[in-house]
Amino acid sequence: LSELADIVGGELHGPPDFRVSRPVPAGDNDPTGITFAESPTYLATVEATGVGAVFVGMDGAESTKPHIRCPNPREAFGRVLAMSWRDLPLSEGIHPTAIVSQDADVHPDAHIGAFCVVEAGASIGVDVRVHPFCYVGEGCRLSEGVRLYPRVTLYRDVWLGERTIVHSGAVLGADGFGYFWDGTRHRKVPQVGGVRIGDDCEIGALTAVDRATAGETRIARGVKLDNLIQVAHNVQIGADTVIASQTGIAGSSTVGARNVFGGQCGIGDHVATHDDVSLAGMTVVRRSIKESGEFLGDRPFPAGEGQRIRAALVKLPELMKRVRQLEDELEALRSRA
Amino acid sequence: LSELADIVGGELHGPPDFRVSRPVPAGDNDPTGITFAESPTYLATVEATGVGAVFVGMDGAESTKPHIRCPNPREAFGRVLAMSWRDLPLSEGIHPTAIVSQDADVHPDAHIGAFCVVEAGASIGVDVRVHPFCYVGEGCRLSEGVRLYPRVTLYRDVWLGERTIVHSGAVLGADGFGYFWDGTRHRKVPQVGGVRIGDDCEIGALTAVDRATAGETRIARGVKLDNLIQVAHNVQIGADTVIASQTGIAGSSTVGARNVFGGQCGIGDHVATHDDVSLAGMTVVRRSIKESGEFLGDRPFPAGEGQRIRAALVKLPELMKRVRQLEDELEALRSRA
Amino acid sequence: LSELADIVGGELHGPPDFRVSRPVPAGDNDPTGITFAESPTYLATVEATGVGAVFVGMDGAESTKPHIRCPNPREAFGRVLAMSWRDLPLSEGIHPTAIVSQDADVHPDAHIGAFCVVEAGASIGVDVRVHPFCYVGEGCRLSEGVRLYPRVTLYRDVWLGERTIVHSGAVLGADGFGYFWDGTRHRKVPQVGGVRIGDDCEIGALTAVDRATAGETRIARGVKLDNLIQVAHNVQIGADTVIASQTGIAGSSTVGARNVFGGQCGIGDHVATHDDVSLAGMTVVRRSIKESGEFLGDRPFPAGEGQRIRAALVKLPELMKRVRQLEDELEALRSRA
């Protein structure tokens, strides 16, 4: 614990040789765990459990447990998380079962795991980690430090920026969904574009990013996509945008920079959102949002208006009754007049 | 048919040597098929088709087809389904193409299919079936009778209880979605926890269950998850809960025991549902549900209230007209007064 | 450019030896790109960019860029897309790492890629392309010209019609979601049926189509499914229906022919839609739709009514205020009377 206090620049209250073995969430009972409490409420939760130790803020209440006072308990906890983290294992160099085209350009300091396929014209940079069962198609480019977790598919012409992470099951570069009706049947519009993803992005498990019809589906630097998201062909997503799980973005739409979308949002096709837009979960965007701010609901509404509509909705059956009553009373008044 | 009647403890009406070759759904025309009819309506449907034979209840109407009277036709049909069922094929022992770490502990009576990867510290119990293309990460534990269908990813520290089934494409243990903004960019919160799933669970195709930030994402015994579901980090799901397809549960939320969720529900983060809660499909839970019962809608509402709101919604344009009329009439009254 | 003009039957305005190297979307600046403009608005966009050349209509305005006049600029552009398209690479015949059962029937002119597994009783027709990491289960049948992109799972008894395409990550034939409560726990209803998909279908990335409990989950010819869609057991989908991403169709429902569903729609179980039904994105269908037409919203409503309800919803808080005011005024009138 005293080592930990030194690392986070905090002040130890408790036995210096107390050993913690892992970070645990608030509410956990692990006597060798350490957690954090940012508020009196959290601290009360922690006190009620058997957890071993806790990070508290500089002005936080006393804890009966061994604790470390530090300016930012959440960040201190993050440091312990980082110390506990280990990546999935991966053998050095190219695994003997991997099938790497002679016409692919693989840096000697890249790792390619078991049962991977790397096609001609793919380029794989220094310190790239490709875990088992990945398919890296023709003309793909994985920049320095890219990490593909097991079982990622990159169709072709998918470019990934430095340090970008793609999680298991994700499919990048599949055909965009485009057909035209020729009077008898749907004919496929060939999808010949690519996908370009910037530096420091993260793509969640089982997320799909389709290639462009022509040109590129583009995700700018620092974008974080959660699991099971759909990004359709020719979508553009601005830098540092964060999108939660199961959201879908339809074809040719443009998401601004620093947007934050909750889960299960639906963005229609050919719409745009301004920079610095936040959408509550399950918000539907059918028309472009032309200003920054928080939005929610079916239209979507600015957050305040949206909340008022939701509140009114609850009272709708009662409102109908009141209107009926008004009509009756008015009728009575009229017949008397 | 007489054999079948014996097996389900029913009474045969029809030729004992009539042969049925497979169970079929009501409405099917297969003359060698057998189906079931729980009600006169279903029986009428069955009578109109060319299906070979039918299970009917003890007090059901006569059928013109060969039929078996039994106390529970649905269960009898289930027996025929079970008799027709065969698992996917899998070779004995460890397939020669599988790559199993010397530091993994694999029971001699486990089956590991072609092109699987099992990392160090993984433990695989008796009668476990791991189909081709599965990735079983470090420290994973597959208890007796677990079945992984082709192409399942377990990142690391994923524990599966006895007889639990995981379907193709599912990803368990991917990183939870956690970042903090450091003033310049989103920094990743390392995700170091695990996933623990109880006995007799079933996880659908292409479903994602993220590992905890710290501690465990926990799914209790008997839980059934359908396809394409998102279970975020540190979620807890209570025993015997059943969740339909495309539902998402955001971080650190707690679902009670014996909950039943329809498809496409959205459960916000840090909320809880009581035991014995049912949600209609597409219900949104933004705040905790603190009592048992049926709920639906956007807030969610108890089922009766929710239905009334939905019904009122339809009349909203008409209501607006009526209010406008009331205002006019009142104005007229006032000017007369 | 003059060659292109000949191919599309258009009239070249500009230097015949101008070289274009790729189709690009409107708004692109690529000086070697060619795009198309169907309307003056599009043409204005194109004029403002550095794109090399453009297809315009017969009666379209002049362009300052090299351009080709043709009857249908969109179709002409589609021709260029088709000329630019190349499929993912695949070796001839059966790749040496593929594991193909001796009891599978594989046409000599089929391609089976690296690390594929083909089980007994599977039948693979002429010109079928199975890309790496596919699992083709027992009794599956891939008709002439079928294409499975990398990492597709077919459990068993999945039949695919001619020229049908299945994208990466899709799972066809996983168990339907069926249980019954035996008083103590959920017992699995064995799922023994199959999946039958017609000719000229396309199944998107990470889409799940479950096998039937008994009988078949059936998708007719010409159906196009986008990514991340759920098709539950015993669903039937009619010919030429097109369904956008993240839509879910619950068990035993029937979708008519030539339906068009936007993204994230939810179709309840045991409902049916008529032929020629269009659903806006996020439409919920809880009861059958018994006529053709456009529908939207939560119920769903015919499009006109749905739009009116949505418009009224926005004014709901204001409406409540107006009703309160009416009540006050009526009260005042009454007390005066």
Image (cartoon, coloured by chain):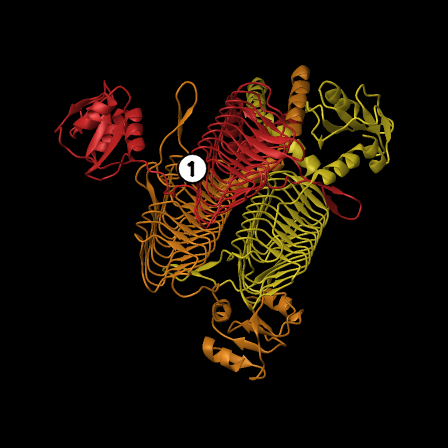
Chain colours: A orange, B yellow, C red
| C11 displayed left or right of B283 | left
Count of numbered badges drawn on the protein: 1
- Chain for mark 1? A
Q: Vertically, is B15 above or below B222?
A: above
Question: For the point 19% across and 27% down, which residue is it?
Answer: C3
Q: Nearer the viewer, residue B308 or B89?
A: B89
| Image location of residue C24, percent across then percent down | 27, 36
Q: Is residue A318 visible?
A: no
| B165 displayed left or right of C279 | right
| A103 displayed left or right of A53 | left
What residue is shown with label 1? A250
| Image location of residue A141, percent across then percent down | 32, 52
Label 1 neighbourhood size at 10 Å, few (<14), some (14-19), many (20+)?
many
The kind of residue tagged 1 is Ala
Q: Quadrant of the C terminus of chain A?
A: top right
Q: Quadrant of residue B159?
A: bottom right
Q: Vertically, is B208 above or below A311?
A: below
Q: Vertically, is C150 above or below C51?
A: below
| C150 displayed left or right of B309 | left
Q: Is residue A130 visible?
A: yes
| Image location of residue B182, percent across then percent down | 40, 62
Q: Quadrant of the N terminus of chain A?
A: bottom right
| Image location of residue B328, percent across then percent down | 55, 20
Question: For the point 40% across and 66% down, which residue is it?
Answer: A92
Q: Secondary structure at mark 1?
A: loop
